[in-house]
Amino acid sequence: MHKLLIPTAIIALSLTALAEDKSKNKKETAQYLQDISVTIKSEGGYNKSEGSGVLITRQIEGEGVTFVWTAAHVVDNLRNVRSVVDESGASIKIVEFSDAQIVKELVEEGRRVGEMKMDARVVKYSNFDHGHDLALLMVRAKNYGKAGAKFYLNDEEEIVPIGTQLFHVGSLLGQMGANSMTSGIVSQVGRIKGKVEFDQTTVTAFPGSSGGGVYLTNGNYVGMLVRGAGENFNLIVPIRRMKKWAKENSLLWALDPKVKMPTFEELKNIPVESSGIKSKSSGKGKSLFETEFPFLIKTSTIA
């Protein structure tokens, strides 16, 4: 009898230890995703909006520099176009962006303990109705970032299979819902909208989720949430499309830490806009895409 009880006890202890390890891993992953997630506030003219973003950290010329991946439509109201006359007398148009404000929620042991606010400039932008709906920002404060996103860069299996469990962390309803964590699955892949590809997910999202990361359960970033048509019908820019866009624009360093970083001078000279096409708008002051299905999911108010 005693000989039979010993293996049973060992199995019970092993199962308990395994459950504790899984619980610990979930807690660590949740904290990590909190650490790399931010709210993005943008204000241009009479329009204010809030969305989400994900931090990455890099070293440039011996200094720690923090960048933020977000959706282009979160910061589109920061875009300004002005005409100038060059030396030859020709009129040219210059595209400029005002700074976005990055709000970092400080969370310890699952409890909010404060927040940090920082300015960030738009480094690269591809608009949402003609481009990829992607934007890369650089936080102006140096040596700030402590944690950064780890991207799913599997060349052999680029597509995350349908049914894969996912997490999303974003600013649901803006700063009010900062660092909200939801879960779901990959519900479909390869949705084509316009000329670009999205993957579909059931992670819960609300206005303000735009630009937020979608992750595997181990914390690896697999896409950016950009559009939705209900709490559990949402579209993400998959990491494979982000990777392609980054490669085309010499930005792979913003996904893969093994790629050589540009210098500060080279960063300054990156052309901010890929498409060069000004966003069209309807007579009612809304983007044509905003009236279509599915919807952009940033918060937006008119002052």
Image (spheres, helix red, strand yellow):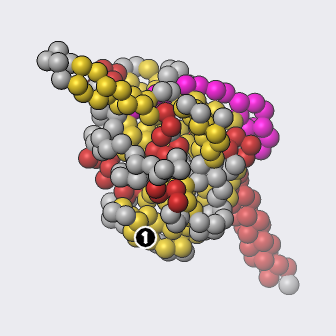
Q: Quadrant of the N terminus?
A: bottom right
How many numbered discs? Answer: 1
Residue shown at 52%/46% (left/top)? Answer: 285
- Residue 290 appears in the picture as rendered: yes
**Is residue 146 magenta-colored?**
no
Residue at the far right in the pictured view: 1
Q: Is residue 274 positioned above or below 262 on the image?
A: below
30 to the left or right of 55 = right
Q: 10 Å neighbourhood of mark 1: few (<14), some, or many (≥20)?
A: few
Of the pair 66 and 45, the residue shown nearer to us: 45
* Residue 107 is one of the magenta-drawn residues: yes
Nearest the viewer among 60 and 71 is 71
Q: Mark 1: which secondary structure?
A: strand
Q: Amino acid at mark 1?
A: Arg
Q: Is 63 on the left or on the right of 42, as rendered?
A: left
Span highlighted in magenta in the image = 106-123
- Asked if one can make out residue 66 in the rendered structure from this viewpoint, the answer is no
> What residue is pinned by disc 1?
191
Q: Is residue 239 above or below residue 74?
A: below
Q: Residue at x 71, y 30 (%)?
A: 115
Q: Main secondary structure of the magenta part?
A: strand
Residue 244 point in image, percent of width and height = 31, 53
